[in-house]
Image (tube, grey):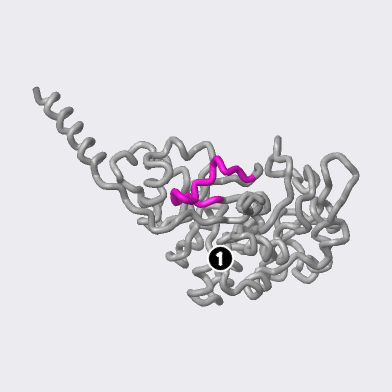
Amino acid sequence: MKHWAVRISVLILIILIARQPDIELDHQGKIISYKGLVQPTDYRGVTNTSCTADRLTEVKHPYIENTIPAIAKAFELGANTVHLNIHVTADKQIAVFHDWTLDCRTNGEGVTSEQSMEYLKTLDAGYGYRIGEEEVYPFRGKGVGLIPSLDEVLAHFPQHAFLLNMKTAGPEAIEVLGSYLNKLSSEQRSRLSFIGMQSIAEAINEEFPAQMTYSKEVGKRCLVKYIFIGWSRYYPGSCSNTTLVIPEQFGRILWGWPEQFAARAQQNGSEVYLYQKSQPYSKDSDFREQGIGLFTGDMTGLGESQVPSQ
């Protein structure tokens, strides 16, 4: 009888929890633009060492990713935040650039973090972009001097938010980044959040506990717990005060997806984004009205979808 009493008690508890009123959204989902603006790219078979600049499928706009013109256009098209890749340079500045090496995208050579900011400024940021196997280089000669420093970006966009992915690993890079953040005011730091390596996230959180960070490790800890006990409306601490980036196919298995999951996250200081980086913008997976933000590499497609038809 005791076993039945326990089971009935658990069932009643589940029913009571399920009947609790829904949590209201604080706001609709926001938009993160991947690297400012990117060109349509074939990502099939891409690995960490792949060169994606020579995989363009077409040229959809005149902008080169991770440059100030591309960032400006992304904000103009409605991005709330722009995602950027950053590296610590040999002269301890922070450069905005994607690859670990220069050989793929530019007319330079060598490891990005082993160069000075002055040298990076001499390069053509559009040199290596190619449409598929065709010998067509649509941006060659158009990106000279366009690799910016993070200082330049923040000065050019003093009111905008950025999600930064530090690509340079190691204690020295972490030290330079920490020193850089220390020089910023708390208001300036509040415009920045970080995504990427766990070691970077841990170092930032240790010195700047209020700084929002995200890594795959954090995401796994958060979402595994939530999958098992989210039905109870418990929200794991590892899911709080962070930027949660969720693969498109993953959302449907989360309790309360999309609106109640987003509301719980917002209630705990987090923003949730659906990852649409490597495919064209799709209305079918745009849940911004339900509180889920959009992390997209196709801001132009998103913009076109919002233009009223004639």
The residue at 81%/57% (across/down) is: 126
Q: In which quadrant of the rendered view does residue 63 lie?
A: bottom right
Is the N terminus in the top left, top right, bottom left or bottom right quadrant?
A: top left
The residue at 66%/49% (across/down) is: 301
Q: Position of residue 172 (x, y in %)?
A: 62, 64
Nearest the viewer among 51 and 142 is: 142
The residue furthest top is 1
Relative placement, left or right, of 247 versus 270 is right
Nearest the viewer among 79 and 48 is: 79
Q: Position of residue 50 (x, y in %)?
A: 74, 43
Whether residue 297 is visible, yes or no, is: no
The residue furthest right is 135
Q: Circle 1 — which element?
A: strand
Please say whether residue 89 is one of the residues in the magenta stretch. Answer: no
Q: Is residue 42 above or below residue 307?
A: above
Task: Count all numbered tags in the image, as a single digit.
Answer: 1
The residue at 53%/36% (across/down) is: 249
> In the rendered image, which residue does mark 1 sit on?
161
